[in-house]
Image: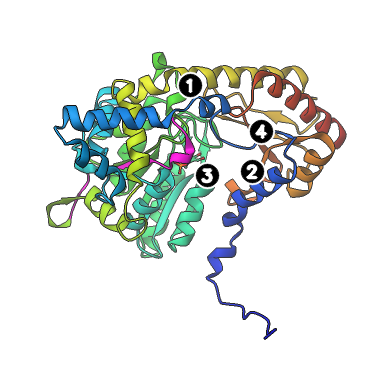
Amino acid sequence: MNAAPAEVWTHPVATDPVMGSIGFLNEVMGRYPDAISFAPGAPAPRFIDAFDHERHIRRYLDHLTHERGMSDVAARRSLYEYGPSRGLISDLIASALARDHRIEVPPRAVVVTVGAQEAIFLALRALADTGDHIAVAHPCFPGVLGAARMLGLTVVPIDVTGSGPDLRLLDDACGRAESAGVRLRVCYAAPDYANPSGIRMPLSARRDLLGLAHERGFVVLEDNAYGFTVDDADEFPPLKALDERTSVVHVGTFAKIGVPGLRVGFAVADQPVRGGELLGDHLAALKSMVTVNTSPLAQAVVGGLLLQHGVSLRALGREKGAFYRRNLRLLLAELDARMPRAPGTSWEHPAGGFFVRVKLPVAADAALLERSAGDFGVLWTPMSGFHLDAEGDRVMRLSCSYLDDEQIRSGVARLAALVREVA
Ligand SMILES: Cc1ncc(COP(=O)(O)O)c(C=O)c1O
């Protein structure tokens, strides 16, 4: 009766280091609950605490009954039943994208997903076959690297310059794929304050990327998770708004602009595909075999949130964007004022997004993170999981989003003490 449980075989991808990167950080944070954490790219607790999902659901139900003419019973039922794989609020998201960004697509092209992560996964599955190449602006959000690995795609890192992915390298990568008898199908990029590089692509670089996509026949997977932190006044159009030849699949999320626990994101996929359908139809078909549909209750919350803000993502993100820009300025000012300028130590000055990368003269690895948490009470994200080479080994990422002013000040003082000791 005491026989040892038999080990089962698992796919090697399950133990790929990139799969462990999020779990590892959560585990460390769990062990040091009192440490000041620059690790999570998550909304500030003040926005989470103020979030009133019941109010948003009521607003959405009012919309269904008053503007869509549904009965009270049918409206309530639609929140508790399965619902279409494409989602319930595609029309609201399509209206918001048209109003805010001049992204004009039919609601059918918008698929509501379980976070941006599912949208990325579905888009990669639909657009690339096992063995195909996908390019990523490098360093890259690990969610993309992990999804590509799960799908058996070959990831080609394209180093970023100050204006986004280096197009010469990207062009070479397309040529190399062709010579190897495969296709480079997709290029992943986040033009508005990428995670982790904080780079924002200028307008000309956006147009050049779209030109190359057309020439070489790949799809640009545009991730707009942090676009709302751009100041309205100096916004550039998203790639999807400049996309005259349906070269772009645009991915968004309500995790940062709303709350992450809702797990609601979306893909905008208006590309024609076989049989007179749109890519959005194919993404919805794939989704029906992964998560079936995105929780209708969570979609109702997001629907109400959008309606409360005049069906505008920009209005929804305005106050939050300003808050995070202010946090980022404070974090940068504190780094500039307090961090020792030891040889090999440097940090960047992004104008938006959540993140600042700090380069150290020593390895920014799990051992240093343990020491940082245990001896100095401060946490951060090691960058090796974002890199496909050794370039990230001495880099830590600091997020400005989760902390208040006092925590940012003391957190940087603690980091400075750590760097003084190790540098
Ligand atoms: C660049 C980027 N894209 C996508 C995501 C995933 O978003 P979601 O929580 O909606 O799956 C994140 C989350 O941190 C991110 O940083």
Residue 341 visible here: no
On the image, the x and y values in percent for residue 54 come to 39, 31
Nearer-N-terminus badge (4/3): 4
Nearer-N-terminus badge (2/3): 3
In magenta segment, residue 265: yes
Q: CA distance from mark 1 to mark 4?
A: 18 Å
Q: CA distance from mark 1 to mark 3?
A: 24 Å
Identity of the amino acid at label 4?
A: Phe
Nearer-N-terminus badge (1/4): 4
- 235 left or right, relative to 362: left
- 100 left or right, relative to 53: left
Q: Circle 3 is placed at which residue position?
A: 140
Residue 191 visible here: yes
The residue nearer to you, when weighing 285 against 1, is 1
Which residues lie in the magenta part?
258-273
Q: Which mark is residue 383?
A: 2
Identity of the amino acid at label 3?
A: Cys
Mark 2, residues whose alpha carbon is within 10 Å: few (<14), some, or many (≥20)? many
Identity of the amino acid at label 1?
A: Lys
Nearer-N-terminus badge (2/4): 4
Q: Nearer the viewer, mark 1 or mark 3?
A: 1
Q: Circle 1 is placed at which residue position?
A: 320
Vertical placement of 63 versus 134: above or below?
above
Identity of the amino acid at label 2?
A: Met
Q: Quadrant of the C terminus?
A: top right
Q: CA distance from mark 2 to mark 1?
A: 26 Å
Q: Do the numbered discs 2 and 3 sit on residues whose CB atoms are within 8 Å?
A: no
Q: Which mark is residue 20?
A: none
Q: Do the numbered discs 1 and 4 sit on residues whose CB atoms are within 8 Å?
A: no
Q: CA distance from mark 2 to mark 4?
A: 13 Å
Judged from the image, the secondary structure of the residue bearing numbered disc 3 is loop
Mark 1, residues whose alpha carbon is within 10 Å: few (<14), some, or many (≥20)? many
